[in-house]
Amino acid sequence: MNFSQKMLREDALKGKVIVVTGGGSGLGKAMTKYFLELGAKVAITSRDLDKLKNTAAELESETGGICLPVQCDVRHYEEVENMLQQVLKAFDKVDILLNNAAGNFISPTERLSANAFDTIIDIVLKGTKNCTLAFGKHWIDSKQTSATVLNIVTTYAWTGSAYVVPSATAKAGVLAMTRSLAVEWAKYGIRTNAIAPGPFPTKGAWDRLLPGNLSEKFDMAKKVPLKRVGDHQELANLAAYLVSDFSAYINGEVVVIDGGEWLKGAGQFNILEAIPEELWDQLEMMIKAKKNK
């Protein structure tokens, strides 16, 4: 079976305006590309404007669509509001918010500084809150009849997971926000759903999380009953469906796409219990060396 096949008809998102946070690379880029192929106009945001511009130019060339790069640090509400205004100025409206921006550290929690812990909370939970609140207020105040928020969470948002405690804590908050607002804001025509992906390796994120040969030592595919990791198009297919009008009756749902991984062993990173103290020291040095390049 070809897991990279596209699922929806070509006009499935025609006329839609979508904002994707963290859209400059990785899974955000993959989802953005498919949204463009389905006829949407997409604004991608992150802190790195140069990367955004390169991605937007690449995706426009590949798809023939319109992709707007907007610099925004989602940790700061005033930047989010400014980003929203730039999107409205360019496209006159926004229909869909995809909260994809994230950060993570793999580390024993006692090795983390308070600032490191706060960094993840600020990007994942506070950033999602900032974007959701700004966009939600706009939709409600402007009396827009329909809108959609799609959040990217993780399966360990409900199980917890050792060695990624800041991420698990933040994603659990996003999960609660998803389900809460699905009820509260439904009366305004706003649907709120989430996707909980399992292993979908991306070059940048996975190299930071598992540098060197650690990705080979801790092969995520071995934890998945289907014996493989996810293909980016599979996630893009699901995301496109959940933000499309075809899913108009889905609200407050969290869809797991992980090949059965969390059912096999809750806590995606619990396997890191096997890492000895000396290897944690090596891991820290490799991460710091990569970060300083």
Image (cartoon, rainbow, N blue to C red):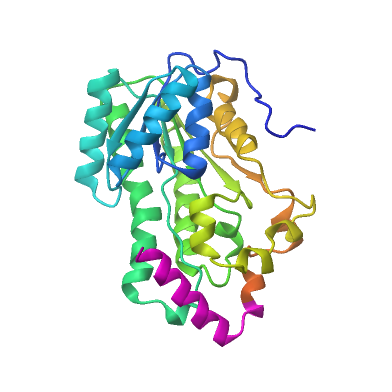
Quadrant where the image shows the C terminus: bottom left
Q: Is residue 174 above or below residue 147?
A: below
Q: Magenta segment: does it hold 139?
A: no
Q: Magenta segment: does it hold 292?
A: yes
Region rendered in magenta: 273-293
Choose top left, top right, bottom left or bottom right for residue 170: bottom left
> Residue 26: x percent and y percent?
50, 44
Choose top left, top right, bottom left or bottom right for residue 9: top right
Magenta stretch: dominant SS? helix
Q: Is residue 271 left or right of residue 57?
A: right
State the count of labels: 0
> Residue 81: x percent and y percent?
22, 38
Q: Is residue 81 left or right of residue 178?
A: left
Question: Camera-side residue: 168 or 60?
Answer: 60
Which residue is drawn at the image coordinates 52% and 63% (left, top)?
Answer: 209
Residue reaching furthest to the front: 293
> Residue 79: x percent and y percent?
22, 43
Question: Camera-side residue: 160 or 221?
Answer: 221
Q: Is residue 52 above or below residue 86?
A: below
Q: Is residue 89 left or right of residue 219?
A: left
> Residue 159: x percent and y percent?
61, 63
Quadrant where the image shows the N terminus: top right
